[in-house]
Amino acid sequence: MLTTDKNSPALATQKFRNPDFTAKGDERATVSLTKLDTLWVNTGTLCNITCENCYIFSSPTNDDLQYFTATELQSLIDEIKTQKLATREIGFTGGEPFMNPQMNEMIKMALSHGFEVLVLTNATQPLLRPNVKQELLKIKREFGDKLTLRVSLDHHSAEYHDKERGLGNFTKALEGIDWLSQNGFKLNIAARSIWNEDETTARDAFAALFKARNYQIDAYSGAELVIFPEMDEQVDVPEITTECWDILGLDPTDIMCASSRMVVHRKGEDNMKIVPCTLIAFDEEFDMGTSLKQSLTANGGNFKGGAVKLNHQHCAKFCVLGGGSCSA
Ligand code: SF4
Ligand code: SF4
């Protein structure tokens, strides 16, 4: 246990170090996996654009996470079956998933095995290539609403969306959403709360935009329009202790890592790695093994019997205090 003075300004630099205790010496909160409901696949960090606050630092040149392959996905699906995991959904995130040349093959593979599929996309050029659109239409015809696309539209105005994503990207994203909407894809939108706009104002403005463009998306549904909290790594946050659940009135089973895991393949590594969630892709101290089976019993460091010790600032900032979750 650390013995730092509870009021010391030096506390900030002592936070998120000891897996078992916070800098104040309190027992750190953990989250157990109740069921692997969603398996996230990071398809690779390459993206066609470079956003200012990309949580995973994607860009047209960042390939720190290499393209995930259909062969790797098949091995995970086999494991889900042999381990009899009650997985409902496979989610794909990036980077921009449609940069990955095997993306549609992986979507189809997951759907063919009976999973629901959620793809997070910026809905710009990679998705709008004619061959990708053609394959997506075929998938849509075969699997209907089992496939959901969640498009990032950071703000309802071009001004703020483009501030984050680069000039012209609001118009490009709308072009992608128009195509998805006109072709009947199940759609939802991911926005951000980084401009200090209150939620009601934001949802009202999104509702007006959806109506004007005839999108069948309910701006007042938290699942159809997800507004993610800011993820500023520089902001100091309190650590989460075992007592926080009661104090905050939160249930640990509602936290993302209670029902999901993510798989990544880092460049230069021989094997894919299982990590607790979509938010912690690079920190090797959060690696849970090279198979789902290993991840279920991960022990030592930041894990105890497959449970995650909330020893990362994202745990506090994004999940517990911000209420964020990546799934539908
Ligand atoms: S589109 Fe998404 S993955 Fe690409 S840079 Fe922006 S936030 Fe990152
Ligand atoms: S950031 Fe922490 S609390 Fe949130 S899902 Fe990941 S491991 Fe769990």
Image (cartoon, grey):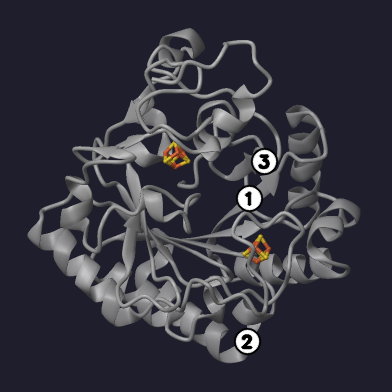
Q: Earlier in the sequence, mark 3 or mark 1?
A: 1
Whether residue 149 is situated above or below residue 250 in the rendered picture: below
- Residue at the (57%, 36%) spot, across then down: 318
Q: Which residue is mark 1?
A: 190
Which amino acid is tagged 3?
Ala
Query: At label 2, which amino acid type do we have?
Result: Arg
Residue 314 in view, yes or no? yes
298 on left or right of 56: left
Is tag 2's residue or tag 3's residue first in the polypeptide sequence? 2
Q: Quadrant of ligand 1?
A: bottom right
The residue under the point 8% across, 61% down is 82
Pointer 3 residue Cβ closer than 8 Å to ligand 1:
no
In this orientation, which residue lies closer to the viewer: 270 or 85? 270
Residue positioned 28% across, 39% down in the render? 303
**Crowd tier of the residue under label 2, counting other residues whose Cα lies within 10 Å: few below 14, some 14–19, many 20 or above:** few
What is the distance, in whole Å, between disc 2 and disc 3 at their CAs? 28 Å
Q: Secondary structure at mark 3?
A: loop
Residue 226 screen position, x and y as percent? 60, 43
Report the residue marked by disc 2: 129
